[in-house]
Image (spheres, rainbow, N blue to C red):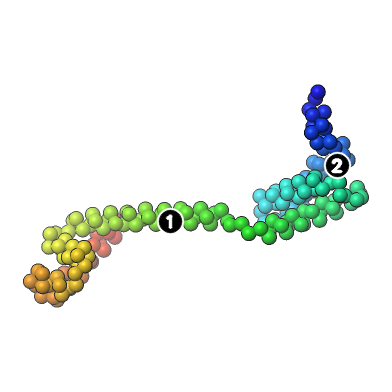
């Protein structure tokens, strides 16, 4: 038994003897789909869906002479169905996912740069940073703890922040 006999038993009338020239129908669907599509990939999707629908509904064609008009209507309807579907853009999804990873990596790198810059400060400046940001003390509380004027604490913290900005900016 050859392949055509197997196909005929599985799908009667599907072997090409049904009067349809399916290669020509595919070309027609694709040509018509380009009218509605924004890109070749979309046109191919529309044409494929239309050709599949035409093949499934080929028995509903009333007049063999109006095949092209019938295919044109199916392609048009498939294009409308394609645009009616609410599908997310895969590129946007990928950018969102990769963007979140990029932000975490960037934050980790920035934190590492900050710690490296702090480790290069002298002991007095490191102590000021630790009291202000690790222990979350106010400038007044730091001044009381170190026994120095509050204005001195403000000036030193300002200078330490400037040193850190320069150190991180040069990395």
- Report how far apart the C-alphas of labels 1 and 2 lie in the structure: 52 Å
Residue at point 70%, 48% (across, down): 44
Residue 168's image quarter? bottom left
Q: Quick one: 17 or 12, which is closer to the camera?
A: 12
Question: Relative to 146, is 9 on the left or the right?
Answer: right
Q: Is mark 2 on a helix, strand or loop?
A: loop
Residue 11, above or below 30: above
Where residue 69 appears, x then y in whole percent? 85, 54
Q: Does any portion of residue 160 appear in the rendered image?
A: no
Q: Name the residue under label 2.
A: 20
* Residue 98 relative to residue 158: left or right: right
Residue at numbered disc 1: 100
The quadrant where residue 131 appears: bottom left
Is 32 or 90 nearer to us in this picture?
90
On the image, which quarter does residue 156 sit in? bottom left
Outermost residue toward the left in this view: 147
The structure residue drawn at horizontal position 21% and vertical position 63%, both measured from the top left corner, is 134
Which residue is the extreme one toward the front? 10
Label whose residue precedes the other's in the sequence (1 or 2)? 2
Count of numbered labels shown in the rendering: 2
> The C terminus lies in which quarter of the figure?
bottom left
Looking at the image, which is closer to me, 94 or 141? Answer: 141
- Rendered position, 151 above or below 125: below
Residue 82 image offset from top left, x and y in percent: 69, 56
Instruction: Depth check: give the residue in front, 159 or 49.
Output: 49
- Where residue 34 appears, x then y in whole percent? 73, 53
């Amino acid at each position: 038994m050859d392949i055509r006999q197997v196909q005929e038993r599985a799908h009667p009338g599907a072997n090409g003897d049904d009067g349809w020239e399916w290669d020509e129908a595919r070309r027609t669907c694709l040509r018509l789909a380009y009218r509605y599509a924004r890109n070749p990939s979309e046109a191919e999707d529309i044409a494929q869906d239309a050709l599949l629908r035409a093949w499934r509904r080929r028995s509903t064609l009333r007049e063999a002479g109006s095949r092209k008009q019938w295919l044109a209507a199916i392609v048009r309807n498939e294009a409308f169905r394609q645009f009616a579907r609410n599908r997310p853009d895969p590129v946007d999804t990928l950018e969102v996912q990769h963007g979140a990873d990029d932000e975490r990596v960037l934050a980790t790198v920035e934190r590492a740069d900050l710690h490296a810059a702090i480790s290069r400060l002298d002991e007095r400046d490191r102590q000021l940073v630790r009291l202000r940001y690790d222990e979350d003390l106010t400038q007044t509380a730091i001044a009381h703890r170190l026994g120095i004027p509050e204005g001195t604490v403000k000036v030193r913290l300002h200078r330490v922040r400037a040193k850190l900005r320069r150190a991180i900016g040069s990395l």
